[in-house]
Image: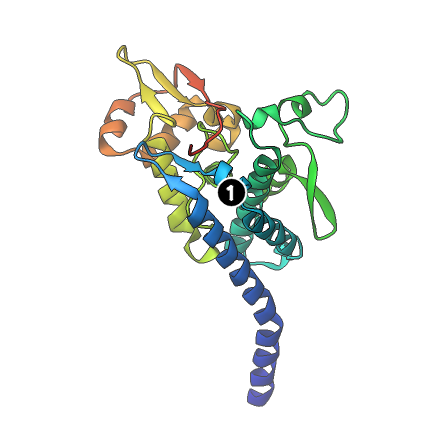
Amino acid sequence: MRRFKVIAAIALALVLAPAASAQESDAKAYGELLAKYVVQGGDGLNRVRYGAWRASPSDRQALDRLIKQMEAAKPSAMPREDAFAYWANLYNAVTLKVILDNYPVESIRDIRSTGAGLLDFKAFTGPWRTKRVTVEGKPLSLDDIEHEIMRPTFKDPRVHYTVNCASIGCPNLDVKPWAGATLEADLEAAARKFINTPRGVRFDANGKLTVASIYHWFEEDFGGDQKGVIAHLERYADPELAKTLAGRTGYDGHDYDWGLNEAK
């Protein structure tokens, strides 16, 4: 019996090792690209050197290869944390490719979707409807990844801090890939970082509270109403912001800057 267990363990390790090695290789290649082109700003916004990346054929090809390699993965067989990280990384890598393929642009919303229905009005205000990758035999758009896979599968509002739409108003594209091993700590850090910047939450001189539009668009993910949104914000707010939010049951307005998050 003991010998059988040892053999079974070795066989399982041999099966899993190639997949794990491939994931590690993809993460390393993606991390090198992010480290080279993502710039952390003193204002808390990470920006991307799209112009320099566009001007480097080898690094554009490296991103294309990375996406192809990720398409060959089988996220349905991954542990939850690894699958979460995989989908977030794929979404962000594809978004980067969309911008680079269409650069220069002032906003991601200047890029229209292709192949969408004539009555799909969102197709005219962004690239999110185009089928861009195929994973486990299923063609997927960016909207499919976020709204048909990540949100319903993981049921975690922090999904919105992992996917970056190449816009100033969006939570940051990190300088490193998402990883299953550090996912929980990284999700918490991303939530705190965004909420404690004016892009996430801000008060004007009259005490009017304006929040990022993601809390309005996806209110159902943040507790289902404005009170739930405030509770989520309070959970991650620094002491000073938490004090200002105390007693609030809602916000006064929301906004979102669709300008390209470009480092010029």
Residue 182 as seen in the image, left or right of residue 137: left
Q: Which residue is mark 1?
A: 53
**Residue at the far top in the pictured view:** 206
- Residue 44: which quarter of the image? top left
Occupied quadrant, residue 248 = top left
Q: Residue sitting at 22 percent across and 29 percent down? A: 240
Element at badge 1?
Answer: helix
Tell me residue 78's x, y (percent). 58, 58
Name the image colouring.
rainbow
The residue lying at 42 percent from left, 32 percent from top is: 264
User: Which of the two residues, 159 or 131, is positioned nearer the viewer here?
Assistant: 131
- Picture coordinates of residue 31 (x, y %)? 46, 53
Q: Does 9 sit above or below residue 26? A: below
Front in this rendered view, residue 154 or 144: 144
Relative horizontal placement of residue 9, taking residue 177 as reference (left or right): right
Query: Can residue 154 be seen by looking at this rendering?
Result: no
Residue at point 52%, 28% (across, down): 218
Q: Neighbour class for label 1 at 10 Å: few (<14), some, many (≥20)? A: some
Q: Is residue 124 left or right of residue 223?
A: right
Q: Residue at x 44, y 51 (%)?
A: 183
Q: Is residue 230 above or below residue 163?
A: above
Disc 1 marks a residue whose amino acid type is: Trp
Q: Quadrant of residue 20?
A: bottom right
Residue 225 in the figure: left or right of residue 135: left
